[in-house]
Image: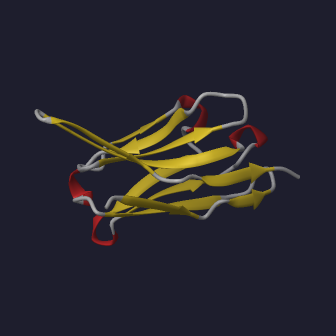
Amino acid sequence: QVQLVESGGGLVQPGGSLRLSCEASGIIFSIYTMGWYRQAPGKQRELVATITPGSNTNYVNSVKGRFTISRDNAKNTVYVQMNSLKPEDTAVYYCNAKYMSAYGTNNYWGQGTQVTVSS
């Protein structure tokens, strides 16, 4: 059974920092592209950042220079360090694991963790 368990969300003031973690089980973590997505109230889910098995990273423009995604294959865990947080970063953040092959795509989601940026 595949599980992605996020942690680290919470309430933070504007300009503050949080680090989200996502621990995966039930998959061969090292071969998956891992990602963080977010969904604000009334908005569609959007990509925040991804990291490939080779640790190539990609970010949505709005978080470039403020967020850093990383992975620890020994711990089956992906992180996102979020600095200089803004109220518009408020959302539920979801962890994603994706693996594509000639036989199809495996795509898994965590349950989400709430991040609220407010004074």
16 to the left or right of 20? right
Q: Looking at the image, is 99 positioned above or below residue 15?
A: above
**Where does residue 52 sit, x and y in percent of width and height?**
29, 45
In which quadrant is the N terminus drawn? bottom left
Kindly identify the residue that appears in the image at 48 percent across and 53 percent down. 110
**Where does residue 25 sit, x and y in percent of width and height?**
33, 65
**Where does residue 84 sit, x and y in percent of width and height?**
69, 49
Q: Looking at the image, is 38 positioned above or below residue 23?
A: above
Determine which quarter of the picture holds residue 91: top right
Figure disc tally: 0
Kindly identify the residue that appears in the image at 67 percent across and 58 percent down. 17
Kindly identify the residue that appears in the image at 77 percent across and 58 percent down. 12
**Where does residue 34 sit, x and y in percent of width and height?**
36, 48
In the foreground, 11 or 54: 11
Determine which quarter of the picture holds residue 81: bottom right
Kindly identify the residue that appears in the image at 88 percent across and 52 percent down. 119
107 to the left or right of 5? left
